[in-house]
Image: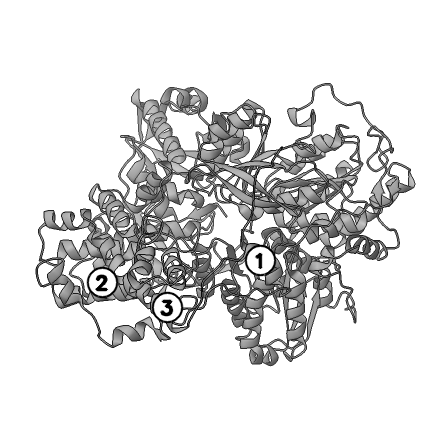
Amino acid sequence: MSAKAIREAAGKDLLRKFVKSKSLAESPCAVVTQDTDWTELAQKYPWLLTEKLVVKPDQLIKRRGKLGLIKVNTDLNGAKEWLQSRLGQDIQVGSATGRLKNFIIEPFVSHQPAEEVYVCIYCERANDVILFHHQGGVDVGDVDAKAVKYSVGLQEEVTAAKVKSNLLGKYLQRNKIHSRHGRTVVLRLCGDSMLADFIQALYQQFRDLYFTYLEINPLVVTDKVYILDLAAKIDSTAEFLCKVQWGDLEFPPPFGREAFAEEAYIADLDAKSGASLKLTILNPKGRIWTMVAGGGASVIYSDTICDLGGASELANYGEYSGAPSEQQTYEYAKTVIGLMTKGDKHPDGKVLIIGGGIANFTNVASTFKGIVRALKELRENLKEYGVSIFVRRGGPNYQEGLRVMRELGSNLGVPMHVFGTETHMTAIVGMALGKRSIPDTPPMDNTTASFLLSGSASANLTAMSGSSSNPPRRTSSTSEPTATGTTNGAAPSTRPKHQTPLAQKPLFKKSSTCFIFGMQNRAVQGMLDFDHSCQRETPSVVAMIYPFVGDHKQKFYWGHKEILVPVYKSMAKAMKLHPKTDIMINFASLRSAYDSTVETLQFPQIRTIAIIAEGIPENKTRLLVQTAKEKGVTIIGPATVGGIKPGCFKIGNTGGMLDNILSSKLYRPGSVAYVSRSGGMSNELNNIISRNTDGVFEGVAIGGDRYPGTTFLDHLLRYHDDPAVKMLVLLGEVGGIEEYEVCNAIENGRINKPIVAWCIGTCSTMFSSEVQFGHAGACANAERETSGAKNQALRVAGAYVPSSFDDLDKKINEVYNQLVEEGKIVPQPEVPPPTVPMDFNWARELGLIRKPASFMTSIVDERGQELLYGGMPISDVFEKNVGIGGTLSLLWFQRRLPPYATKFLEMCLIISADHGPAVSGAHNCIVTARAGKDLISSLCSGLLTIGERFGGALDGAAKQYTEAYDSGLIPMEFVNKMRAEHKLIMGIGHRVKSLNNPDKRVVILKEYAQANFPATPLLDWALKVEKITTAKKPNLILNVDGVIGAAMVDLLRNCGAFTSEEAAEYVEMGTLNALFVLGRSMGFIGHYLDQRRLKQGLYRHPWDDISYILPEYNA
């Protein structure tokens, strides 16, 4: 979710700090909770004792005045007395019941009703809107109908003069002469200027502070401008841009829903993860609990539960998606199951639905292993509460995941029913609620590896065809060349003369090529495998762009062969060398996606950009959309997996692995084109359409953000105008109004081909409090934005709308069969695609192969939770108190250092002594020793590899952090600066360890320094940098180099043994890297001795681990 509501006190505080208007009055505010000490509060805010006051709850409650929840014109004693009967009490507001916990007290502003006005600012796709009404207050009424509206362009400069001319006409007319305090006075000439100046300054901060909604009612205009009541939402994704201004901003839950500790725990896991982990507890006493993978799928499961009468028993809403690790999934599952199995039991038992669509890139087996761990651990709780479990999932390695689940179900001791992609996604909901029978032996698809075997593709197609009474077949290429299909019997209309740029030509052709921004090797290989299965002549990826390394080439597979794909540091160079490439797939992070897309838009050859990142601030996205529209460029995303055109082109990870490409027949075109918001649900649509029609012609996931680069209608019109497309499918969702554009196009005849449509999120109206679903745009701000209203509008317009998502597959099949009967689609026999071999790593993941190790070692193991030296955990090594720190203090620093300092040096040496045989230095040392060379030669062979890439980052980290800290940069500014300069942050990142699998070495050093050093300002600063970098990716942690570098600077500066000049000199001369060199030398020597003791012979690298790429010789 991006737009999040904030408390009134927080909003006023931001405006008080940053609105640059002399018109705005100082309006202090005191917060009161059940824990407030009134004496301390009065001391902190002396005006409480002298002024008349206003008291009101600050818990996102609307229409507080009409509810009698505002006390005005009282003193402190009156405020206390009023609060005594309300603070901590439960009240009902609409259908929501909640407890009053948070109040604010402000000075009372004496004024007349005529001095109240209404101001509201909110965002739309192409502009911002300022609403102004010359009458405000509790009885303002329907402001949408009454207020004056000023639409502000995204890059328009708003001035006080524009505000006055566009908004204040009625206000100025009304206030030429007005009465106040019984006296008639002429309005001061500066009155209108004061209000115009304030609104102009207010709008500027609305834009600068990334508000998405800001309503002030009333705004009182007397001698100054007073903000009395305020409601605001802010774009939480802009935190990396606004952290300095926002400070620690709280996003409270909506009134009527308590903030549970478990929700906070999952939110913390989510913040530390590159995946998406969400949990909202709706009814802790509910019988039906869900654990769903995917933002769109999580909404659909909730919809189906509510459609089948389970709304009152639905306990939670949430999702896990974005390839969470096994450990993260375990923590998530343990939390949900723990909530489910505490408190009151249910007489009918409880239901746990572990559901999801077909994943694009998440390893299903890995995530299921985490769930299995949690189920095993809480086995007795599940039995005690009579839990029944229903599982449905698809995606990479899902067969192994389902096998593990079925195996668990046989001995868990609770009923468990497990299904795969052969079962409709939401069918398990009907089974769980007793609305649908449970099959005794569920049908199963072929295994993940089946497509590798000779003839397996044909067998797979035969098996799939045989499973249907109406076997889907490929559309004839000789079928009708023009679009003559009708919707619900409506006659085809004349196509309008004017067409949008999207409707003029397809985005993707079989010859289309693209650039990949970012090092996304897995996505590139998936695209190349798809290309090969589609029998493309050349790969669709011509180059990768990665500004953090120099130009080089990356190795990939093209079928059975290995090929090289160039990687460019400069985008301009890539464009120059590949002038015919017109697609950019941007995998940049949320922090840099905007800048990299702006750079891409500067090159006229690019006509399509897919932006994968989720969490780009909405203001930035809207600017991208505007710029792209001006340049005629199509943007897919942000927050998308992309799209796919079977037999032609696919974006990134769309469509999942090759087995899903084959099972969903995405290697060749069908006749059905779809558009959805959800990336995960786009893959589910591939499955549904392939099982109920002749397959997908093209599908695009426009993205889950509020302002996607392109809309549903953009793509539907493009599909509609392609003669090969016979049928359209739209999967919309709650929030936004883009679906009404589709309704208009159907009603005016612009779309006359059959379209099956469904909007997910129908459950949103059944909850007592507002629920923000997985996608940022999935939240209805008005009745018109609800899924029910949109489904009805589509139905009335003439679209084929099922009764629920549970029936979507049937409706698609019904319309398809009708087209076949009418002769508009002529099925053709399937042609099997070529086989593509499985990658080595994936085959190993499936347990199909094994490979002998190249090295043996008996002195160190870095793979587990804690580093081992000769079998001893590193924490035990420290307990033996063995070290030479005192010696180092004499030899290196020519003085004795305090005991805590020498102890720290010893710790650095022990920790840096070794990190396994796989790193470059140890590798060199072992190979040299096995060649029969002496100790010194072997040691030097290892030492010569030490540099910036391996082991030599201590000095670099210390210098980067020190320079930034001394120049006064806060961590967020430092991270942004490094990103802007395309520089890596030294001492940040780990290949194996992460926030969820912390490096024990870093923890030990950090805790020792913080507990024993006189001060650790630079280390504390570096840890704040870590919080920012890990928000992007959980393995971007402060590593050993970073913690030693920062802590050593703190030691040198604060131990009292060095002047500031000496401390700086020791860092500059390389003392910190010397710690690493000395410590690692112990490990290198150990490897030399180990190889001699094990009598290891001459090492020769195996041929099968070397790629021989030679130029062709032409005699």
Q: Are marks 1 and 2 in contact (CB under 8 Å)?
A: no
Secondary structure category for the residue under label 1: helix
> Looking at the rendering, which quadrant does residue 114 occupy?
top left
> Looking at the rendering, which quadrant does residue 630 occupy?
top right
Instruction: Provide residue 420's location: percent of width, then percent of height.
Output: 71, 61
Q: Label 2 sits on what residue type?
A: Ala
Horizontally, is 144 left or right of 889 in the view?
A: right
Q: Are marks 3 and 1 in contact (CB under 8 Å)?
A: no
Disc 3 packing (10 Å; few <14; some 14–19; many ≥20): many
Say if 463 sits above or below 418 in the image.
above
Instruction: Provide residue 532's location: percent of width, then percent of height.
Output: 69, 43
Q: Label 3 sits on what residue type?
A: Leu
Which label lies toward us, 1 or 2?
1
Q: Which residue is mark 3?
A: 867
Secondary structure category for the residue under label 3: loop
Q: Which residue is mark 1?
A: 841
Horizontally, is 7 left or right of 652 in the view?
A: left
Q: Earlier in the sequence, mark 3 or mark 1?
A: 1
Of the pair 571 and 170, the residue shown nearer to us: 571
Q: Which residue is mark 2?
A: 1009
Disc 1 packing (10 Å; few <14; some 14–19; many ≥20): few
Q: Earlier in the sequence, mark 3 or mark 2?
A: 3
Secondary structure category for the residue under label 2: helix
